[in-house]
Amino acid sequence: MRHRPEVVVYTRAGCGLCRRAEALVAAEARRVRRRTIDVDTDEALVRRYGVRVPVVVIDGVEVAELELAPGTVRRAVRTARRRARRAA
């Protein structure tokens, strides 16, 4: 069975960069488990991420923060799948 990486986008309400990151993740990350988490809903997340949102995490590895370049998510998903195959 093919590994379905988990892609998490840490965001904040009213964040334009966050909206762009969410759209790019939706376009580039197919056949993955995708979640969006508002950091302002949890004090620990506010302390951890502060103002450096959006942050994109794939299988527990931060792959981008603030600006998300096209292709970044696609490459990181491929890397996560390769890593999972090697671990199996």
Image (spheres, grey):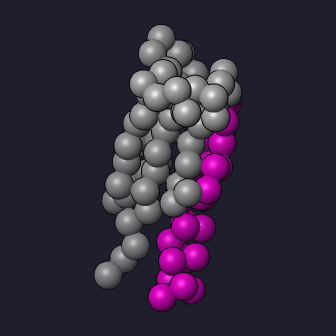
The residue positioned 58% from the left and 26% from the top of the image is 46
Q: Is residue 85 left or right of residue 76?
A: left
Q: Compared to 64, does 30 lie above or below?
A: below
Q: Nearer the viewer, residue 25 or 7?
A: 7
Image quadrant in which you'd find residue 38: top left
Give x and y (percent) for residue 34. 37, 48
Give x and y (percent) for residue 84. 51, 77
* Quadrant of the snapshot with the N terminus: bottom left
Q: Is residue 59 magenta?
A: no
Q: Compared to 84, does 58 lie above or below?
A: above
Q: Compared to 85, does 16 lie above or below?
A: above
Image quadrant in which you'd find residue 35: top left
Q: Compared to 45, does 80 lie above or below?
A: below
Q: Nearer the viewer, residue 70 or 34?
A: 34
Q: Is residue 72 magenta?
A: yes
Boundaries of the magenta span = 61-88
Give x and y (percent) for residue 76. 59, 58
Q: Is residue 63 left or right of residue 23?
A: right
Tell which residue pokes out farthest to the front in this image.
Answer: 43
Q: Nearer the viewer, residue 43 or 54?
A: 43
Decide if residue 74 is in sight here.
no
